[in-house]
Amino acid sequence: MNIDKKHIVISTESLTIGYQHKKQDKIVLSNINFSIKKGELVCVLGKNGIGKSTLLRTLSKVQKPISGHINLEGKKLSHYKENELSKKLSLVLTERLPESQLTVYELIALGRQPHTNWLDTITANDTKKIELAISQTDIFHLKDKRFYELSDGQLQRVLIARALAQDTEVIILDEPTAHLDMHQTLNIFELLKKLALETKKTIIISSHEINIALKMADKIVLLKENEMQFGTTDNLSKANAFDNLFPNNLLIFNKTLQQFVINKS
Amino acid sequence: MLQKNFKRHFIFLAIGLLLLFILNISFGSVSIPIKDILNILFGNTETKESWQIIIINFRLPKAITAVLVGSGLSVAGLLMQTLFRNPLAGPFVLGISSGASLGVALLILGSSLFGGYFLSNSFSNWSLPIASSLGAFIVLFAVIIAANKIRNTMSILIIGLMFGSLTSAIISVLSYFSEAAQIQQFIFWSFGSLGNLSWPEILIFFIIYIFGIIATIAIVKPLNSFLLGENYAKSLGINIKKNRNIILLITSLLTGVITAFAGPIAFVGLAVPHVARMLFTTSNHKILIPAVLIIGAIVMLICDTIAQLPTSEFTLPINAITSLFGAPIVIWLLVRKKKLFV
């Protein structure tokens, strides 16, 4: 039990997420409890509007929790200073980058900012980290291109490389496979799986690709109305967590395949 | 991270700046041979005394003012474009220049409305710059208060535009009730002028200018992180609010002092950063800040040289020249590149 606890990177204690207003807080989801270990690939799944992005935004300290705590590496998230957190946690967001002439290499190098001096001088060690990130994401052939010349799939790999160069324990990605076709979606999932395994970084993503996520993720955070469930695909399947996830029975969960299938009848 | 070697670009620009500076000094209503100009600049006193006075007290201060105005406005423009991630931002857009104009308008035009309070026809050297800076700071202050309440940078840009039209409206009302002589005086100020500065005034100008430039260099890291957008910048450990306020403060200081001493000068702040980005094809501020400083100075020296060329008897208004050349440059950039970057 003790050894297990040591490996826990990020965990929540009766966390309630939502938006704070003057009159009344708008609660999105409450009683969220999970602990994520080092090197795990975790997928946050759930319907549109259930609170996946809100959860990820709360975990990355973009917004405050309504109540409860988040622990990152044994310290409360609220106690982290901005520059301290930037060495522990990096992000890949869905928002479009402002139009600029940054090259892929420069964009990845910006990931080193938390580790550089006030003039942003790139040291030999920084160069090593940047080149490692480039080789891990297999984008060497893109490095001198400008980022606006890339396809959506290529840009996603570059943004992942930027997060890798930031060299943090945790990487949080908000819907990294949005706008991608099935092949590229699988590519990104494979890349993330490989990175979690090889670099021992904890990777948390939200996704709509529920079937791919069920196959690839080490753990699932399943968000439903009024409750959340956490565990491996196997555990959650046995606990009947996936039944009635979607209304109308258009999609039903097949336990033997551990996949959602279209209900033809 | 410097990937390309931009040394050649910078050497060419620096030589160009030096030549233009000397060329600028050599033009004027009295023709002085280049050899004597160089002699005077290097402290040689064996030339005509009247020439020395012309160079040291008139042409040299004017050329230095051109360099400070051009580079200062360009840096302010670069900062605005990066902060708002909008290629059309500039000191004018934020309403800071309009605020400075309002200050001057109140001083010149308001004196007739408020009676003899402002000793209408005999302004001291200082009243114009003080009024102009105050106007710039009041608008800036309002923008900063708005910026701290509103997170969306686009909204701040629109608020800046609104302040701009508000101040123009007040100036229109003031003009309507003013006498012709005062309107004329105000219009002459709004043409812009690089010429009328004394050495002590240039010293004050330079101190504020250099403070702004050093502060800009000090925030080169946050400036580069802003290229990814505010959320990424925050995740890289950058304090958004603090750096945003620093950028607003630098911009208003530079714009305020420049408008005070040289009048409202349009287009340089908007156009020069785009010229720099096109020449250097980069968005990296470590390259862009020095590039914009040199190119801004060059552009202003060219404009001033053109302004005094035609008749050599008197000079054209500098603000008209910058617009005459600035507007076509921006249009040409847009047509040629089809895309403007931040």
Image (spheres, rainbow, N blue to C red):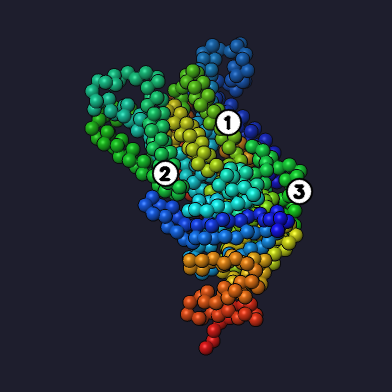
Q: Residue at x 70, y 46 (%)?
A: B3
Subunit bearing disc 3: A
Residue B214: assigned label: 1
Q: Residues within 10 Å of mark 3 (few under 14, many from 20)?
A: few
Q: Residue at x 59, y 35 (%)?
A: B217
Disc 2 and disc 1 on one polypeptide chain: yes
Residue B149: assigned label: 2
Residue A7 horizontal side relative to residue B267, left or right: right
Q: Nearer the viewer, mark 2 or mark 1?
A: 2
Image position, residue B248 (x, y; %): 48, 37
Secondary structure at numbered mark 2: helix
Residue B177 horizontal side relative to residue A41, left or right: left
How far, Cα to Cα, is label 3 from label 2?
42 Å
Image position, residue A27 (x, y; %): 45, 59
Q: Residue at x 39, y 37 (%)?
A: B142
Image quarter (top left, top right, bottom left or bottom right) of the N terminus of chain B: top right
Secondary structure at numbered mark 3: helix
The disc, 2 or 1, on the residue closer to the chain's N-terminal end is: 2
Looking at the rendered structure, the number of numbered marks drawn on it comes to 3
